Amino acid sequence: MTKRIAIAILVVGCTLASGCTRPAAGLTPDDVERWLRDYERALETKDAALAASLFAPDGVYRETPYAQPFEGRDEIAEYWTAATAGYEHIDFAFETLAVDGERGVVHWTAEFVSAAANTAIELDGVMVLEFDAGRVTTLSEWWHSRDRLPRGGLRAR
Protein backbone atom coordinates (compact mmCIF):
# COMPACT_ATOMS: atom_id res chain seq x y z
CA MET A 1 0.00 0.00 0.00
CA THR A 2 1.44 3.34 -0.96
CA LYS A 3 1.82 6.18 1.50
CA ARG A 4 -0.80 8.31 -0.32
CA ILE A 5 -3.37 5.49 -0.16
CA ALA A 6 -2.67 4.95 3.53
CA ILE A 7 -3.06 8.67 4.23
CA ALA A 8 -6.30 8.78 2.23
CA ILE A 9 -7.67 5.85 4.23
CA LEU A 10 -6.74 7.60 7.48
CA VAL A 11 -8.37 10.85 6.33
CA VAL A 12 -11.59 9.08 5.35
CA GLY A 13 -11.60 7.09 8.59
CA CYS A 14 -11.08 10.20 10.71
CA THR A 15 -13.78 12.03 8.82
CA LEU A 16 -16.33 9.24 9.15
CA ALA A 17 -15.51 8.52 12.79
CA SER A 18 -15.79 12.19 13.70
CA GLY A 19 -19.10 12.84 11.96
CA CYS A 20 -17.90 15.41 9.45
CA THR A 21 -21.31 15.66 7.81
CA ARG A 22 -22.10 19.10 9.23
CA PRO A 23 -22.09 22.00 6.76
CA ALA A 24 -18.92 24.02 6.24
CA ALA A 25 -18.59 26.78 8.82
CA GLY A 26 -16.14 28.98 6.98
CA LEU A 27 -12.70 27.45 7.60
CA THR A 28 -10.71 27.53 4.37
CA PRO A 29 -7.54 25.79 3.22
CA ASP A 30 -5.83 29.22 3.40
CA ASP A 31 -6.80 29.49 7.10
CA VAL A 32 -5.21 26.10 7.78
CA GLU A 33 -2.10 27.03 5.77
CA ARG A 34 -1.67 30.27 7.75
CA TRP A 35 -1.97 28.39 11.05
CA LEU A 36 0.53 25.79 9.85
CA ARG A 37 3.07 28.44 8.81
CA ASP A 38 2.91 29.83 12.36
CA TYR A 39 3.21 26.28 13.76
CA GLU A 40 6.23 25.72 11.49
CA ARG A 41 7.86 28.95 12.73
CA ALA A 42 7.17 27.97 16.35
CA LEU A 43 8.72 24.54 15.82
CA GLU A 44 11.76 25.66 13.84
CA THR A 45 12.54 28.43 16.36
CA LYS A 46 11.52 26.36 19.41
CA ASP A 47 9.17 29.18 20.46
CA ALA A 48 6.87 27.66 23.10
CA ALA A 49 4.94 30.90 23.64
CA LEU A 50 4.11 31.15 19.92
CA ALA A 51 3.13 27.47 19.81
CA ALA A 52 0.79 27.84 22.77
CA SER A 53 -0.77 31.00 21.32
CA LEU A 54 -1.97 29.01 18.30
CA PHE A 55 -4.37 27.12 20.55
CA ALA A 56 -7.58 28.18 22.25
CA PRO A 57 -7.03 28.85 25.98
CA ASP A 58 -8.41 25.39 26.80
CA GLY A 59 -6.93 23.77 23.68
CA VAL A 60 -5.90 20.12 23.67
CA TYR A 61 -2.73 18.67 22.08
CA ARG A 62 -2.79 14.89 21.56
CA GLU A 63 0.73 13.97 20.51
CA THR A 64 -0.16 10.29 20.06
CA PRO A 65 -3.43 8.38 20.42
CA TYR A 66 -2.59 6.65 23.70
CA ALA A 67 -0.58 9.34 25.48
CA GLN A 68 -2.15 11.67 28.02
CA PRO A 69 -3.09 14.87 26.13
CA PHE A 70 -1.68 18.26 27.01
CA GLU A 71 -4.55 20.54 28.03
CA GLY A 72 -4.46 24.32 28.03
CA ARG A 73 -1.82 26.73 26.79
CA ASP A 74 0.43 26.32 29.85
CA GLU A 75 0.70 22.53 29.43
CA ILE A 76 1.18 22.89 25.68
CA ALA A 77 4.01 25.41 26.23
CA GLU A 78 5.67 23.12 28.80
CA TYR A 79 5.42 20.17 26.40
CA TRP A 80 6.80 22.26 23.53
CA THR A 81 9.78 23.42 25.59
CA ALA A 82 10.63 19.87 26.67
CA ALA A 83 10.00 18.28 23.27
CA THR A 84 12.21 20.69 21.33
CA ALA A 85 14.97 21.23 23.91
CA GLY A 86 17.54 18.80 22.50
CA TYR A 87 16.82 19.37 18.83
CA GLU A 88 18.86 21.37 16.35
CA HIS A 89 18.40 22.21 12.65
CA ILE A 90 14.64 21.60 12.69
CA ASP A 91 12.90 21.52 9.32
CA PHE A 92 9.10 21.13 9.09
CA ALA A 93 6.99 20.71 5.94
CA PHE A 94 3.27 20.16 5.48
CA GLU A 95 0.48 19.59 3.00
CA THR A 96 -3.19 20.24 3.77
CA LEU A 97 -5.14 17.17 2.68
CA ALA A 98 -8.68 18.20 3.54
CA VAL A 99 -10.78 20.92 5.15
CA ASP A 100 -14.31 20.15 6.29
CA GLY A 101 -16.37 22.40 8.52
CA GLU A 102 -13.99 23.56 11.24
CA ARG A 103 -11.57 20.63 10.78
CA GLY A 104 -8.35 20.41 8.78
CA VAL A 105 -6.38 17.25 8.00
CA VAL A 106 -2.67 17.65 7.32
CA HIS A 107 0.22 15.42 6.25
CA TRP A 108 3.49 16.66 7.74
CA THR A 109 7.16 15.76 7.89
CA ALA A 110 9.93 16.98 10.15
CA GLU A 111 13.66 16.47 10.26
CA PHE A 112 16.02 17.52 13.03
CA VAL A 113 19.26 16.63 14.73
CA SER A 114 19.22 15.20 18.23
CA ALA A 115 22.51 16.37 19.69
CA ALA A 116 22.27 14.03 22.68
CA ALA A 117 21.72 10.95 20.52
CA ASN A 118 24.17 12.07 17.81
CA THR A 119 21.62 11.28 15.12
CA ALA A 120 19.34 12.88 12.59
CA ILE A 121 15.68 12.00 13.01
CA GLU A 122 12.87 12.02 10.47
CA LEU A 123 9.20 12.15 11.41
CA ASP A 124 6.27 11.52 9.09
CA GLY A 125 2.74 12.05 10.30
CA VAL A 126 -0.82 13.19 9.98
CA MET A 127 -2.60 15.68 12.20
CA VAL A 128 -6.26 16.53 12.54
CA LEU A 129 -6.87 20.12 13.60
CA GLU A 130 -10.19 21.31 15.01
CA PHE A 131 -10.61 25.09 14.92
CA ASP A 132 -12.76 27.70 16.63
CA ALA A 133 -12.31 31.40 15.81
CA GLY A 134 -8.89 30.86 14.21
CA ARG A 135 -7.42 28.93 17.14
CA VAL A 136 -7.04 25.18 17.41
CA THR A 137 -9.22 23.58 20.04
CA THR A 138 -7.87 20.06 19.46
CA LEU A 139 -4.78 18.80 17.66
CA SER A 140 -4.47 15.01 17.27
CA GLU A 141 -1.38 13.44 15.69
CA TRP A 142 -0.36 10.04 14.38
CA TRP A 143 3.30 9.79 13.40
CA HIS A 144 6.29 7.52 12.88
CA SER A 145 9.99 8.21 13.23
CA ARG A 146 13.26 6.85 11.99
CA ASP A 147 16.86 7.65 12.76
CA ARG A 148 19.29 8.56 10.01
CA LEU A 149 22.79 8.08 11.42
CA PRO A 150 25.53 8.88 8.92
CA ARG A 151 28.55 6.59 8.85
CA GLY A 152 30.80 7.63 11.68
CA GLY A 153 28.02 9.60 13.37
CA LEU A 154 27.05 13.21 12.91
CA ARG A 155 30.13 14.54 14.67
CA ALA A 156 32.35 12.71 12.16
CA ARG A 157 31.30 15.09 9.36
Image: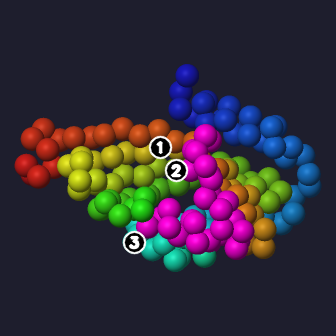
Q: Is residue 68 magenta?
A: yes
Circles 1 and 2 in contact, beta carbons < 8 Å:
yes
Q: Is residue 82 left or right of residue 31?
A: left
Give the quadrant of residue 134. Answer: bottom right
Q: Is residue 117 left or right of residue 122?
A: left
Q: Which mark is residue 42?
A: none
Q: Which mark is residue 45?
A: 3
- Say what secondary structure mark 2 lies in: strand
Magenta-tinted stretch: 54-81
* Quarter occupied by the N terminus: top right
On the image, the x and y values in percent for residue 85 come to 35, 64
Q: Is residue 33 left or right of residue 146?
A: right
Q: Residue at x 50, y 67 (%)?
A: 78
On the image, the x and y values in percent for residue 30 come to 67, 66
Q: Which mark is residue 108?
A: 2
Q: Would residue 57 be seen by someone viewing this image from the given angle?
A: yes
Q: Residue at x 33, y 46 (%)?
A: 121
Q: Earlier in the sequence, mark 1 or mark 3?
A: 3
Q: Which mark is residue 124?
A: 1
Q: Dot 2 surroundings within 10 Å: few (below 14), some, or many (20 or more)? A: some
Front-lying residue, 17 or 3: 17
Q: CA distance from mark 1 to mark 2?
A: 6 Å
Q: Is residue 116 magenta?
A: no
Front-lying residue, 129 or 59: 59
Q: Of circles 2 and 3, which is in front?
A: 3
- Say what secondary structure mark 1 lies in: strand
Question: Amino acid under label 1?
Answer: Asp
Q: Residue at x 68, y 31 (%)?
A: 9
Please determine whether, in this image, residue 148 is positioned above or below residue 156.
above
On the image, the x and y values in percent for residue 33 come to 61, 64
